[in-house]
């Protein structure tokens, strides 16, 4: 079963605008990760935020984590056409032991129009 | 340095057949995980292997099995294929079983697109 719920399911913006995607999850986590997927191919790791962190930046990406609300958001600033992809959050649950199991949300499909 | 490589890239099989998918992790990575991604959904965890031992198994039937070889490459086997097994199968590698948990994510391959007809 999938833990993450992502919102919105689809997002269409103009190049240069900011894109915000949200992820909610159900259980306690060690960390939360965001991945990008182009055209149903492999996933690319974007950023990881630990459970004791509240905000993290990487280039044009900003991730926030609110463990009290069990939610995270991914902000892409000054979007480009090349950012067009599906974005997934994935959680590493407390209690997953040594399995290394990630639980993915259903993803947000982002379209950036030139 | 080569990334995670998966073969084949595409595969068409008939119901009831068996399939073997292969994955070579990044050089030096000892952990391989397998995920199934059905169209329109997020990936679902199938297995993780570390140092040739199974470390985790997702909620998949016994028709799914895997193994890891001494060179850390891995195979995913699916028997008695069903139409519902049609999906993108993703392999991910990491240096450790828990990829420096809290520091790094996984590196994924481009996947094998399996179609069962």
Image: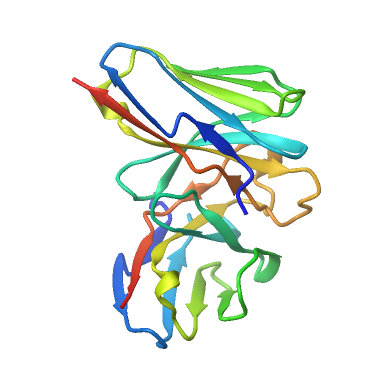
Residue B108, placed above or below residue B89: above
Question: Can residue B32 be seen from the camera position used here?
Answer: no
Provide residue B84's location: percent of width, then percent of height: 44, 70
Look at 60% across and 49% down and name the residue there.
Answer: A2
Provide residue B82's location: percent of width, then percent of height: 44, 78
Residue A10, placed above or below residue A106: above
Residue B98, placed above or below residue A35: below
Residue A53, placed above or below residue A28: above
Q: Quadrant of residue A31?
A: top right
* Left or right of residue B12: residue A18: right
Provide residue A5's location: percent of width, then percent of height: 57, 37
Question: Can residue B85 be seen from the camera position used here?
Answer: yes
Q: How is the image coloured?
A: rainbow
Q: Quadrant of residue A82?
A: top left
Quadrant showing the N terminus of chain A: bottom right
Give the camera-side residue of B30 and B12.
B12
Look at 65% across and 65% down and name the residue there.
Answer: B59
* Left or right of residue B30: residue B23: left
Look at 65% across and 46% down and name the residue there.
Answer: B99
Quadrant showing the C terminus of chain A: top left
Total marks placed: 0
Provide residue A44's location: percent of width, then percent of height: 43, 41
* Left or right of residue B15: residue B43: right
* Left or right of residue B16: residue A79: left
User: Which residue is farthest left?
Assistant: A114
């Amino acid at each position: 079963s999938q833990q993450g719920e992502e919102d919105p399911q689809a997002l269409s913006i103009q190049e240069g605008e900011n894109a915000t995607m949200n992820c909610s999850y159900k259980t306690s986590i060690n960390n939360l990760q965001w991945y990008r997927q182009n055209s149903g191919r492999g996933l690319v790791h974007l950023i990881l935020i630990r459970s004791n962190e509240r905000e993290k930046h990487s280039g044009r990406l900003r991730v926030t984590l609110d463990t009290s609300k069990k939610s995270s958001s991914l902000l892409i600033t000054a979007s480009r056409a090349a950012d067009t992809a599906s974005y997934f959050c994935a959680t590493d649950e407390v209690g997953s032991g040594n399995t290394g199991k990630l639980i993915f949300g259903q993803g947000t499909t982002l379209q950036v129009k030139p | 340095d080569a990334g995670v490589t998966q073969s084949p890239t595409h595969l068409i099989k008939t119901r009831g057949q068996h399939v073997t998918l292969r994955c070579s992790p990044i050089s030096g990575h000892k952990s391989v995980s397998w995920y199934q991604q059905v169209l329109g959904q997020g990936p679902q965890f199938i297995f993780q292997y570390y140092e040739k031992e199974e470390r985790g198994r997702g909620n998949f039937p016994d028709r799914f099995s895997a193994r890891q070889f001494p060179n850390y490459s891995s195979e995913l086997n699916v028997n008695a294929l069903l139409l519902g097994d049609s999906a993108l199968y993703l392999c991910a590698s990491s240096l450790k079983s828990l990829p420096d948990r809290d520091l790094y994510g996984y590196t994924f391959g481009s996947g094998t697109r399996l179609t069962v007809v």
